[in-house]
Image (cartoon, helix red, strand yellow):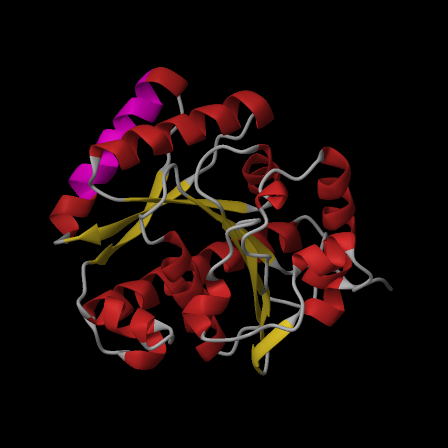
Amino acid sequence: MNTTLSIAVLSGKGGVGKTNLTLNLAWALHEQGFKALLMDCDMGLANLDVLLGITPEGNLQDALMGGSSLAEVLHPIARGFDVLPAASGVPELNDLSPDLRAALLERLEPMLGAYDYVFMDLGAGISETVQAFAALAAVRLVVITPEPTSLTDSYALIKVLNARYGLRDFMVVVNQVASAKEAQATFDKLKGACGHFLQIEPVLLGHVRMDKKLPEAVCRQQPLLAYAPGSPAAQDIQNLATRLQRVRLSMLDWLGRRGVLQSPA
């Protein structure tokens, strides 16, 4: 019986705050009593360990190319909150071969059921590895900013995932905005392009305001929600976490009504 909600966090370009958002969303849900796994899927350019100020003893490279198991390279942050670190400075991992991707996914599957939420922090862009993880997840969360390049690159990402995997369901978070009005206007541009050219209607999960406390938290190597839980961006992220809870509950309700979650007699 799988009650895990897997969430692939994507962006068309770098610099939109995707990794920080992923970390703080996972932290928010952990603080609310849920078990969360945070996977650094930015192969070769990992930085979750830097944001958390940790020095993992192992990483995905060790599990894929060495003798370590995935369980051995898990790094516990708190009870019920684990990080699966990726390697940094290993560019050949950025585009895993199909065989390595298949091996990784096969070894991941037995682990994921131990968590309520699994967050996959994917690299920016449209690499084969990004596409494979995005297709695997139950939810695809695209992070955008008001910058025109963010919008065009995110549209390209959605277009490729639709063409290659037939994916049509995307949620969007508008990051680094001054107001809810700016967030809605930014989202409407992306939604308009997706609707007109792809006949896809992404869903706005919410927005996160610009916040001077965020770079302070990064410098202190702490999640924003631990460093400044009352800050505007932290409040916005808490709202996003609450909406993700509703998504998971809807999923469980849907499965339950179809008998998928019924215990065997």
Q: Can residue 235 be spotted in the picture?
A: no
Residue 44 vs 169, above or below: the answer is below
- Which image quarter holds the C terminus? bottom right
Residue 188 vs 9, above or below: the answer is above
- Whole-percent x, y for residue 191 in the image: 29, 31
Where does the magenta region start and end? Answer: 184-196
Q: Is residue 18 left or right of residue 162?
A: left
Q: Is residue 255 within the magenta segment?
A: no
Q: Can residue 223 be spotted in the picture?
A: yes
Closer-to-camera residue (265/249): 249
Query: Quick one: which residue is furthest to the bottom in this view?
Result: 79
Q: Identify the residue shown where x is 37% and y is 73%.
A: 223
Query: Quick one: which residue is furthest to the right in this view?
Result: 265
Query: Quick one: which residue is furthest to the top in this view?
Result: 197
Image mark count: 0
Q: Is residue 52 left or right of residue 73?
A: left
Quarter occupied by residue 130:
top right
Give the dominant element type of the magenta stretch: helix, strand or loop: helix
- Which image quarter holds the N terminus? bottom right
Quarter occupied by residue 82:
bottom right
Q: Identify the residue shown where x is 39% and y is 36%.
A: 12
Residue 171 vs 67, above or below: the answer is above
Q: Is residue 257 left or right of residue 143?
A: right
- Whole-percent x, y for residue 250 in the image: 51, 54
Closer-to-camera residue (181/91): 91
Q: Is residue 189 within the magenta segment?
A: yes
- Whole-percent x, y for residue 32 in the image: 45, 77
- Whole-percent x, y for residue 14 in the image: 36, 44
